[in-house]
Amino acid sequence: MKRIALFILLALVLPVYLFAETDTVLLGYVAQGNIQQVKTLGPEVLPQLVNLYKVAAVADRAQIADMFYGLSWKSEEAKQALLADINTQDPRLRLAVQWALGRVSDDEEVVKILLDKMRHDPNPLFRDKAACALASDQVHLTEHQKILLYAGVIDALEDTEPQVRDIAIKVLQIHTGQTKGYLPNDSGAGRAAAVTTWREWLEEYRKQYP
Amino acid sequence: MKWFLILLAALTANFEASAQIKLPSGFSEVVSLGFDDNNITPGPSTFLVFQNAKGFVDINDQFAASGYRSFELQEVPLDGNFVELQRTFPLKDSGTLLLSFAFLVTNPEDEFNIALAGPNWFILSRDGIGFWLKGSGGKLALYSDSIPKLQAKIQAFRWYRVLCYYHIASGTLDFALWSEGNTKPVVTLNNIANATANLNSRVQTLSFIGDLDDRSSVHYFVDDVVVAYNPDEKITLDPSVNVPIRFKSPDKPPKTAPIGSRAAGLSSATQQPASNTNPNDKKSIYFEGFEELSTALQHEVSCIPAIALKDFGIETEQIGRLKGHGLWEEFSKIFDGELELRRLDHFHGQDRAVALSVLDWRRGCRAINNKLLPEATAELDNAKRLNPNSPIIDAAIIVALTLGGKEKESELALMNLFPRWQADPRFTVLAAWMTSFKGNLSGAISALKPRAEELLTREIDQPLLKKILSADFDAQGFIDLQRDYPDRWRHQLDDLLLAQNYYYLLIWDRQLKPAEEFVQAMVARYSKAGISRAAWFERLGDISFLKPNLEQAIAWYRHALEEESTRRSARLKLIEVEIRLGKIDDAARERDLLQP
């Protein structure tokens, strides 16, 4: 019902002259949440999808953000559109945006923003899901960009907030399969030793990709 | 990281043939995949091939690190899945695992991945990925301590061999990499951390895939896969000693073996310059494979071997449907005779018909081997009735008809097969064998020579000849021909069958000069009539290859492609010759022009 509402709402709101044939088809697929059909339209449909995102209501933008996530096609316009909502307090939309950003972009700016959210967002849920995005959804990064991500996450191992330390090591564990003995609730000395190990590891990684 | 595993197909060829391995002392074989044995059996159910909707996997006789065949993977981007060759084996939780394989990539800029994993499957964790080799951007990286460490650049169309000792308890591995043409390894590593630096990371699955992010269009070949086990944790890889397999062309055709088990006979591509190489010492892709099959047929008549699912008309859609219903593994057992007949009740419609047709084909071929023609004919006719679109069943019927002296029927069947199989080297083997069947090779050539010479002087009925030579000419066209030319229909087919057969008989007999003269005359004949000369230019290329004169071969193959740019066989031969001459960039460009 929500999807039908989206379809009707968009059809009423958008000026008629925006409705090319493809727009209508796309609108239908988006309203149905039919990502497989959107895929058949190819990456050329991204600008229209971005336009739909910009004019949609909050709840519907989350649905479109999910679509960006599923498509995993790089798009600067999609990135900019999603970044406009990076500070939204709507949980559904915020999470969808955080997850989708890495799927539409290989921009280091996205990594830095997510690292910042992971460490400094006042909402622990948003911090946690920013970590999820860093762990699983930065799919276009080069090795050099991954090093940037790892550096930021390793820095977070020294955060004063226990939750941040906890989600940071989870990010590293998902990426590497290792903890290198780091325990987020360990003593300061224990954590410091493990962080040193992680930094040495990062240096070894950097040597591979100067 | 996620490794998406979607079962869609299992190959029919038996991969369990020996990969010509000599294992180091203390190791016992766990997996050996050479892809050369042509016995139509899928192997144990633990061997799986994953094929997505647009990419493909197949046994390939174009490139082989050793023996005659390799396994080919072609990835396609943005199709939601990836292609995969996967092999599971009993879980290893201690000791040392030996992993060895060869790979060749045609487009090394694209990504491919090769990994060993344990019960946690293909994620970076203990009991997840233990060994991970990744090719991308023309470079090869080995994951160690969760870092993709660059090891070597990889060149297109060059075979590489990997040997790895995976020490389970210590979480370490030894690694060596050889490049074709080099006796010493280009990379040697000892006692480095495994993929995730995890101790006691168990393994049970080996996997070869394209990329993980659905962006790669990698095209690569895998051969000589060996996994072996030694309970000794401390044994160390010594690359000067522990080379399980060398790059090696086959010295001789495969042994005669039961039904459908003769290999088409192919060899590895090599990049050694022609000045240091006599091509006759190494076997070519189409040419001598054709020759070996022909020789084998001359010595002992049997069915033309099946080497791919499509030989039985089995296409991706059918495989996908069977997979969707969880029936593929069961279905594939028909190829090794393991399927109990009562299990056929699980299959319906076309699936059941195809399954029964394969069983009938096997029985028919067995009967041909045992010289029981009436029985062979009955079985093969039944197979044909069940599966009318199988080229390999038709080929078996032609063999049976020829053996039974049914000349007209065998010619009709050959004509029916021609449009579907004319580009397959096995068709020309079959056609030439039919011609020579009744007598010896010299006798057959002598018998054909006057007719071939007379053919060269004949006037051409251009519209009719174009029609006969077209891909659309089928059994109905043949029947129409007989109706329209009741006294001279065979005469009209001479350009198609007689000329081709005479040429191949001359090649069989290594009479290169007469063959060349004849082909040149056919080129002149077709030039006057405005008929495409592509097939004859290609044959001039083949003759040049055999002389050997590789530069001349390249020129003739290019002439053939100028006449017909979509002539796949000519382009594949051109690629092979360019590789032999070290013209890798040219070969890569030609490879990009290959039509699917």
Image (tube, coloured by chain):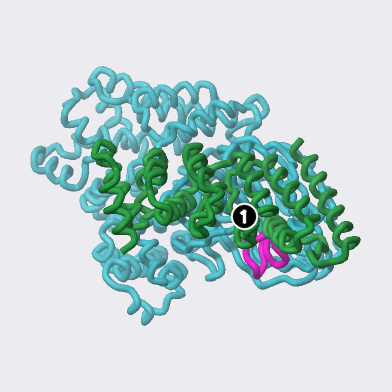
Rendered cyan, the chain in question is B
Q: In the structure shown, which secondary structural element does the residue marked by tag 1 occupy?
A: helix
Give me the residue at 19% from left, 25% from top.
B460
**Is B556 rendered above or below residue A41?**
above
- Relative side of B188 to B210, left or right: right
Q: Which residue is mark 1?
A: A130
Residue at 46% x, 43% y is B290
- Pinpoint residue B39: horizontal percent, then vertical percent: 49, 62
Q: Which colour is chain A painted? A: green
Residue B302 lies, with reference to residue A71, above or below; the image says below
| Range drawn in magenta | B116-129
The reply to whether residue B350 is in sight is yes
The answer to whether one can see residue B71 in this image is: no
Quarter residue A146 falls in: top right
Identity, as a three-letter code, of the amino acid under mark 1: Ala
Kindly identify the residue that appears in the image at 64 percent across and 35 percent down.
Answer: B155
- Give the main secondary structure of the magenta stretch: loop
As for residue B125 lying within the magenta part, the answer is: yes
Q: Nearer the viewer, residue B538 or B44?
A: B44
Query: Mark 1: few, some, or many residues within 10 Å (few <14, many ≥20)?
Result: many
Count of marks overlaid on the render: 1
Where is residue B21, by image quadrant?
Answer: bottom right
- Chain bearing tag 1 is A
Give the camera-side residue of B458 and B34. B34
Residue B438 image offset from top left, x and y in percent: 34, 49
Relative to B356, say whether A3 is above or below: above
